[in-house]
Amino acid sequence: MTSPLPSDHYPFTSVNISPSNPPALKRVSWKSPSNIALVKYWGKKPVQIPTNASISFTLDHAHTITSVQPTIRKGGAPFITFSFEGSKAPAFAHRIERFFTSLFPIMPWIENYNWEIESENSFPHSSGIASSASSMSALALCLCDLESQFADRKLTHEDFYKKASYVARLGSGSAARSVFPKLASWGSHKQIVDSTNLYATPHMGVAKVFSTFHDDIIIVSKEKKSVSSSAGHRLMETNPFASTRYQQANEHLSSLLLCMKEGDLSSFGKIVEDEALTLHALMMCSNPSYILLEPNTLEIIKRIRLFREKTGLHVYFTLDAGPNVHILYPDYQKEEISAFIQEDLLSFAEDGLIIKDQIGAGPQKLL
Ligand code: PMV
């Protein structure tokens, strides 16, 4: 099998085993969270290199648990069995197969095993919440953990997570950020020391209020998106506003870091909302154009803005690549905002589904 990944991009030492005598590996399990981008990654170059830097809150409750058991391959082509919440999921098994193939140049030992992978999500399967960030980061952590079972040199804690972020990135760009707690940025940016396109890094140095943030997700539609994120990234290659957008994203990130450091919630909210609407504006002016927003998405946005004007409270919206609305607010306003969501927004959620989440502590190895 061949892979498109040039191994000279790999900033870690590749570890290998003797193919004639591969070691037995113990089953590993990791729980890894989803994340919500504040400055969005939208557009990429080969291989999974972002066209601008991005930053996200790591979530707490929305997570994937993945367990991986490799068994030594005696002959024939390597095979992967993947089950999701107890049922075989061949479509995702194919995605994992492509992902594993892309990893051969940096993790050549993968080819010596057959793979049994089990996965489950904490959020409802058909909630319209993308799971690639949590699922690919959980899988990447499992692979790095397995590699540490036979590597001669143990990685530092910091390098282990950098490597996991690199590997997660190859599965799904946004997954690179899920490997770190609270706030993580990904992509080369002049104001972020040691930032790189190859993996994400945790971002510190922000006002305390941001570690108390909630993210209540109003599920406007549980339907699978009509245009996938991969197709959306591809359409940026011909988007007439692409280069302006990449510059804007990097400027947004500079400004966002400053207001997060200073605890300036209003400016934070303005940038985050601009980012959400820009993401969807880019979809609308792609060729072909498409719209993922629903009438209820717009109604919720309108009501959040009205409520904010009336009360002066810090409550802001953001959107992922879909119609569901993420409502961000600091914990000290929890009572008022929860009441507002219950009274004014619940009726716009499909089957009344709201996922209440908050900023989280990052992935966890399960025993
Ligand atoms: O990681 P991907 O390839 O599914 O892209 C996700 C992009 C957004 O979720 C829309 C934005 C982001 O930065 O997470």
Image: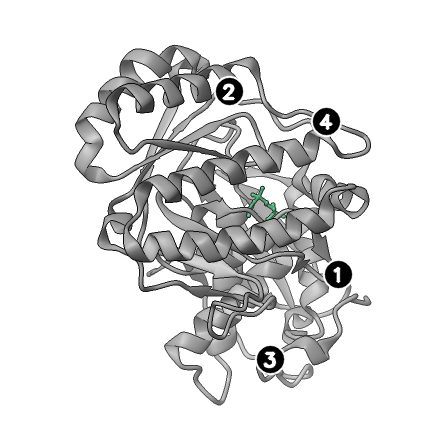
How far is the residue under mark 4 from the one under mark 2? 15 Å
* Residue at mark 2: 297
Are the residues tagged 1 and 2 within 8 Å (C-beta)? no
Secondary structure category for the residue under label 2: helix
* Residue at mark 1: 46
Can you tell which quarter of the image residue 30 is in? bottom left
User: Percent position (x, y) of residue 168?
Assistant: 56, 60
Q: In front of the other: label 1 or label 4?
A: 4
How far is the residue under mark 1 from the one under mark 4? 24 Å
The crowd level at tag 3 (other Cα within 10 Å; few <14, some 14-19, many 20+) is: few
Q: Is mark 2 within 8 Å of ligand 1?
A: no
* Residue at mark 4: 290
> Which one is earlier in the sequence, the residue at label 3 or at label 1?
3
- Residue type for callout 2: Thr
* Residue at mark 3: 11
> Which one is earlier in the sequence, the residue at label 4 or at label 2?
4
> Which one is earlier in the sequence, the residue at label 4 or at label 3?
3
Q: Nearer the viewer, residue 70 or 13?
A: 13
* Above or below 302: residue 125: below
> Which one is earlier in the sequence, the residue at label 1 or at label 4?
1
Q: Nearer the viewer, residue 177 or 288?
A: 288
Question: Is residue 359 found left or right of 55 in the rendered image?
Answer: left
Can you tell which quarter of the image residue 28 is in? bottom left
